[in-house]
Image (cartoon, rainbow, N blue to C red):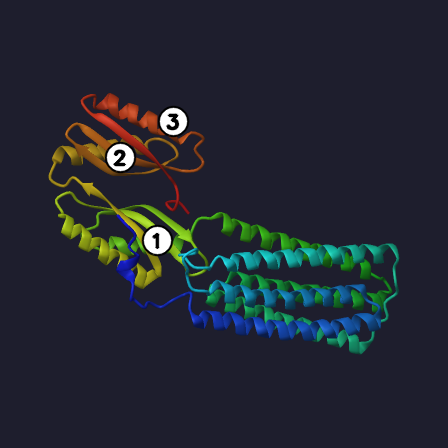
Amino acid sequence: MDSMEKQVSGIKPKELYSEARNQLIIRTSILGISANVMLALLKALVGMATHSIAITLDAVNNFTDAGSSVITIAGTKLASKKPDKKHPWGHGRIEYLSAMLLGTLVLSAGISSMIEAVRKILLPQKAEYTSVSLILVAICVLVKIFLGRYVISAGKRANSETLVNSGRDALLDALVSATTLAAALIYLVYGISLEAWLGALICVLIIRTGVEMQLNTISEILGQRVDPDIVRAVQKTVESFDEVHGVYDMIFHDYGPGRVNGSLHVEVDDTMTAREISDLLRRIAVKVYQEHQVQLTAVGIYSMNIKDKKAVRLREEITKIAMAHSHVLQLHGFSLNDNIVQFDIIVDFEADDPEKIRDEIAAEVSAAYPELTVQAFCDADYTFSE
């Protein structure tokens, strides 16, 4: 079936990718910029006054966070651009690129700070803490905890991975600042200086965060499996139509947060007319878009033998043969036309040789029913398993 884009035009569902979403991300990012710049300046002053490398590096980390919020705003603005001739599916994936840039920024800050921390280990400098400086660091910890929790909450509401990453980074900063405060207290009570070593530990945490952010974003850009909840929800919606006996071959493509396109096959009675099928597919496309904001670019059909008792019996028996094989997840698309039997099997990604499994099943069916010509096809496990 051709693209079903025209069939959903004019519909105004509750958009995940909306101006309200963009405004939420931008407002939250501006809050993050303001808070991080103030915290960075405060920590920088405290770090220089106390000669604390750990507090100074913590200030650098806050400046990095402010820069990441700028990247978030820029990425959101660019990603919200309307589709054009060159990018008909929009620019939503720019958010993934901005998340990758954010990870690179965090990673580079961690590496450069590590160099400075190692230098301080080799050439230690005595810190001079005051009560005022410690109180200021404690206030910074509380501000970062509040900021991190708020940004993560806003990121989840806006379905923004970049914003969630920023919030997690803020909570990590709070932990780092709390550790710095604890080291200062240890120095004042016991006279043991952990400054430079703590700075190195902070850098390790920053580097680890940067690497994790990069790996997560790379996985999204490569094209990871769509959220199973979306798959189940769409499948349930399509199965709600009385004419549909089954939903198969569900393939989804992510073009950015809130922008998912997909295709699938539905199994219907082999007695339906072309007009009835056309009307059904239109109704399916409209309902899926209204309820899940997933645009079905194609909906194919499998015809189900409902009057031929031989076909019904063969389907049950051949399904048993196929499902007896390990790694086989599903058999669908069964059709019996004269003496030609056709069906598809889904084999999971753990199988070393899916085609071999398909050939073995076809051979067993041929042996059990020598009068039939068997045509078996192998499908990949795109959305079936979790």
Label placed on residue 356: 3
The answer to which image quadrant residue 378 occupies is top left
- SS at badge 1: helix
| Residue type highlighted by circle 1 | Arg
Give left or right: position of 217 versus 301.
right
- SS at badge 3: helix
Give left or right: position of 214 versus 268.
right
| Residue type highlighted by circle 2 | Phe
Mark 1 lies on residue: 232
Give left or right: position of 283 versus 50.
left
Mark 2 lies on residue: 343
Q: Is residue 137 visible?
A: no
Q: Residue at image x 87%, y 59%? A: 124
- SS at badge 2: strand
Q: In whole angstroms, how far apart are the C-alphas of marks 3 and 1?
A: 30 Å
Characterize the local packing of mark 3: few (<14), some (14-19) or many (20 or more) Cα atoms within 10 angstroms: few
Taking 101 as reference, is 341 above or below it? Answer: above
Q: Position of residue 301 (x, y in %)?
A: 23, 45
Single out the residue that lies furthest toward the front: 85
- For marks 1 and 2 on the same chain, the one whose residue lies earlier in the sequence: 1
